[in-house]
Every structure is written in structure tokens, then in C-alpha cells.
Image: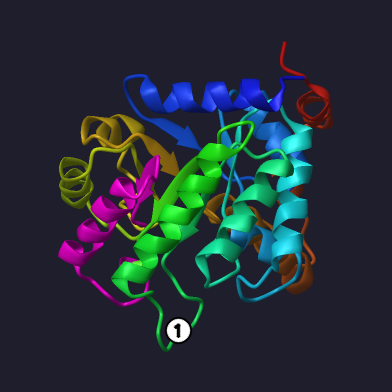
Amino acid sequence: MRTQAEKAAVFRTLHERPGAFIIPNPWEAGTAKILEAIGFEAIATTSRGLASMLGRAEDDANRDEVIANCRAIAEATELPVNADLENCFAHEAEKAAETIRLTAAAGAVGGSIEDYTGDPADPIYDFDFAVARVTVAAQVAHSLPVPFLLTARAENLLHGRNDMDDTIRRLQAFAAAGADVVYAPGLRSLDQVRQVVRAVDRPVNVLSGLLDPDITLKELSDAGAKRISVGGGLSRLVLGTFVKAAREMHEHGSFTWMREMIDMTDLRKMLSRRSE
């Protein structure tokens, strides 16, 4: 098994080499191991996927639950793990940064801090306060025994603030404050991806969820994106398939969905596989 330091080095190399890479989002140890067996080079946790696994309608897992999920995923795989930490479960910068420390102790080699407050009535932190939070989080992330790759997220576009100028201003400030990667979930076109990439001097993470699904990794790479994540997309796909099969049984007494099941031999190989 790779050490955490080895995983961190691999993760940083992925951000430094030419071209973009996909960082898919498992929600527990089994899906993490399957993604590793398929050949992905890094993975990221998902707050939406975890909330669904816990039976919750909202993304309201607490810090202990998120860190426990992160630990289970990190221990299951050789891959670098990036943690979805929302607003780091605190408003105050020092308390938010403590989440970074705890997440690193759980085995992650990267994670995110965002400027969404958690309050739909007042969703985005004031600019200066948001920058201060990233500054302290970056200081902690970079002081750890195994350096932690910090992603800073500007959440405007997911919360009704369709202001690209302010979003880019925030990303630029987060980069200046020490973020290693910047991320504006909610970009809807390759033109917007290019706009962000041109404006910042850090690797850019792009969420595929609101983009046209026909846009490819190559097109995103050509646009300058570095890292492509899918958020809760894989979890929602699996649940969509589950619901479809359950309704087929309930409404029609039919089991044709069984033709789509993964072969048990293949599944066992994926779950038992270890990287060399």
C-alpha cells in the first residue's frame, strides 16, 4: 500500500503534468475500489453521495461523518483521495482550518473549502471574509507533515449569483491567498471554462454536471481545465438504476433488469484487486 506521502506526491504530479484528468467521486469503500480497478488515478469524495448513502434528502452530513467516510475510502485504495469538505463545517477561519487538519489525519491528500455559508437566505460569504478563510486554510494545509493540496471553491453559480466577474475575482483572490487549485462549480459552457482558465494562474477543477454531457475530456483539456469531477453524478446514476429496477418489479412484476447486473466474477476481481 502506498504511504500517504506517496499518494500526495502522485496527486501533485497529476496537477503538474500536461492535460486534464478525471477525478471521479465514489461514496464508500466499494465504489472507490471499483474506480481504482477500472484505472482512474485519483478519486474525490462526494457530499451528495454520502448524504444519499445515509438516507438524507439534503447534503447535511456532519464533520465526523464526512471524515469517517473519507478515512474509509482512503484506507480502501491506493489512490490519492480529495475530500469534499463543503465550508469545512465552520464559519470562523481557524475552526474551518481544523477540518483540514483532521481530514489529512484521516488519510486524504487534498480537500476543498468553499464560500457557501450553508444558509440559502444568505448563501455566499462576504469577499474579504471568504479570502481570509482560504488564507488560514492554506497555511494549515501547507504546514502539515504531508502537504495537503487545497482547492478553493467559489459557489456563486450554484446559488443564484450568476456573476462571472465576481466569481473570477474570488478565484483570483483565493489563488493569491494560497489555494493550490481553484474551482467554480456551475460553469455551463466551454467558453466559461476558458474564461476562468485565462483569468487564474492555478489548476482549474471543472464539475461536469451542468455542462453538456457530450463535452469530452479532450475538449475540456483543450480549454485548459486540469481536473474534471462529477460530484454526486455516479451516485445519482446508481440510484436512478436502482429506482428503475425497483419500479419494474413493483409495477410490472418483472425482473428484466437482472440482465444488466455486473458479473460476480468481475465484481470480486475489482473488490479484491490491489495496485502493484
Q: Which quarter of the rendered picture does the N terminus lie within?
A: top right
Q: Where is residue 150 in the image (x, y as percent from the top left)?
A: 48, 44
**Residue 94: image x %, image y %?**
56, 62
Is 76 left or right of 224, judged from the image as shown? right
In the picture, residue 205 is in which quadrant? top left
Is residue 133 visible in this depiction of the protein? yes
Point out the stretch of residues depicted in magenta.
156-185
What residue is disc 1 on?
120
Q: Please, which residue is most extreme toward the bottom here?
A: 121
Residue at (73%, 30%) from the top-left corner? Answer: 77
Q: Is residue 145 above or below residue 70?
A: above
Q: Type of residue at label 1? A: Pro
Q: Is residue 164 on the magenta stretch?
A: yes
Taking the spot 68% from the left edge, 25% from the top edge, the residue there is 37
In the image: residue 184, left or right of residue 78:
left
Q: Residue at x 70, y 58 (%)?
A: 66
Q: Which residue is drawn at 63% across and 57% down?
A: 98
**On screen, 160 above or below 270?**
below
Tally of marks: 1
Q: In this view, does 182 lie above or below 223?
A: below
Secondary element at image label 1: loop
